[in-house]
Image (cartoon, rainbow, N blue to C red):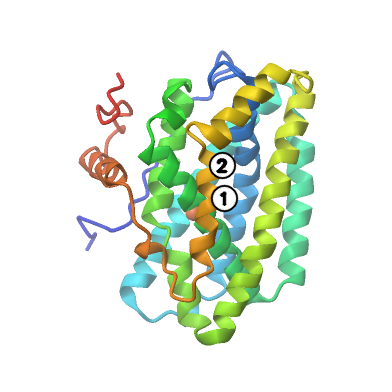
Amino acid sequence: MEDPHPRIEPRNIQFDFAPELPVDWHSDNPAVSHFYDALSLTFPQGERFFIDSVRLFEGEIADPELRRDIKSFYAQEAIHSREHASYNALLSAHGIPVEGFNRLMEKATRWAQRMMPAKGQLAATCAYEHYTALFAESILGDPRVMSDAHPLYRDLWRWHAMEEEEHKSVAFNVYQAVAPGFLGYLRRVIVMTIATFDFMIAIPILQTWLMYKSGNLFNFKAWGKACWHLWISPGIWRHVMLGVFSYLKPGFHPDKRRVDPRVLEWRAHYRATRKREIGMHPTLFGES
Ligand SMILES: [Fe+2]
Ligand SMILES: [Fe+2]
């Protein structure tokens, strides 16, 4: 029987990435928009990697609740992957060579899957899931992060953030079940360190590449505003980077992180609107 109140609920939402949508959809600023675009470019392939890495260990999980969570995790990530593929298709229509980037990303992912031991792949998923949960904390906990975004993109990022918040413990719980003890801890810390360098380098490079491709590489005003948005106010990148440290504690668990009460309100809102086109204009942040 279907659980009427699942802890993790995939919401099969389709966003209409129409050609008329603004290219500089956030703050009317290419550098801010391209920061989020850079994240979006990595998602279709990245989220498939997350699913594959959990699938490697699914057979070892006996706990029925965790098994149910795993299924919901697959469903959520698969839908995210699909929606970000449409998001990226619009970037392609705006002249960004997304196909070439996807081929490169696919090769890199296949190489990582060949080279990394299975538990290392799962540890990488845990590390990136911590990152996505930190982004979610900021996107849902601070109205300023998306208040100057086009409504469609704002809704997409908040929906994705909500679901990342919901399933943030799944890969970690699987990892704890299959890689307990000191060795498991050591592996996840080493992998997080590598993932942090990868993330800190890859996203700014991608953002710079997008700025170059859109003819904004030397738009210093845009860069300045983006630095302010990312590091100072609201400072989403700062929040994410500072949040990495908690992951390094031996007793870390995603559920132990303090969550802003507004994040819980978002969850209540999404639950109240389940099973129908989600009302994307909640009053929580005083938006219409
Ligand atoms: Fe996701
Ligand atoms: Fe995720």
Determine the residue positioned at 72% across, 72% down. Answer: 116
Could you say which is closer to the camera, residue 223 or residue 114? 223
* Percent position of residue 278, x then y: 31, 33
Name above or below for residue 239 compared with residue 19. below
Is disc 2 placed on a helix, strand or loop? helix
Determine the residue positioned at 56% across, 13% down. Answer: 20
* Tag of residue 11: none
Tell me if I can see residue 77 in this picture. Answer: no
Amino acid bearing label 1 = Met
Q: Please rate how many residues cluster around mark 1, counting C-alpha atoms within 10 Å: few if below 14, some from 14 to 19, many from 20.
A: some
Query: Image quarter for residue 262?
Result: top left
In the figure, is residue 283 to the left or right of 130?
A: left
Tell me if I can see residue 101 in this picture. Answer: yes
Q: Quadrant of the N terminus?
A: bottom left
* Residues at marks 1 and 2 touching, judged by CB atoms closer than 8 Å: yes
* Percent position of residue 189, x then y: 60, 71
Residue at the disc numbered 2: 237
Residue at the disc numbered 1: 241
* Percent position of residue 105, x then y: 74, 49
Q: Is mark 1 within 8 Å of ligand 2?
A: no
Q: Quadrant of the C terminus?
A: top left
Could you say which is closer to the camera, residue 16 or residue 28? 28
Name above or below for residue 46 compared with residue 186. above
Determine the residue positioned at 45% across, 31% down. Answer: 145
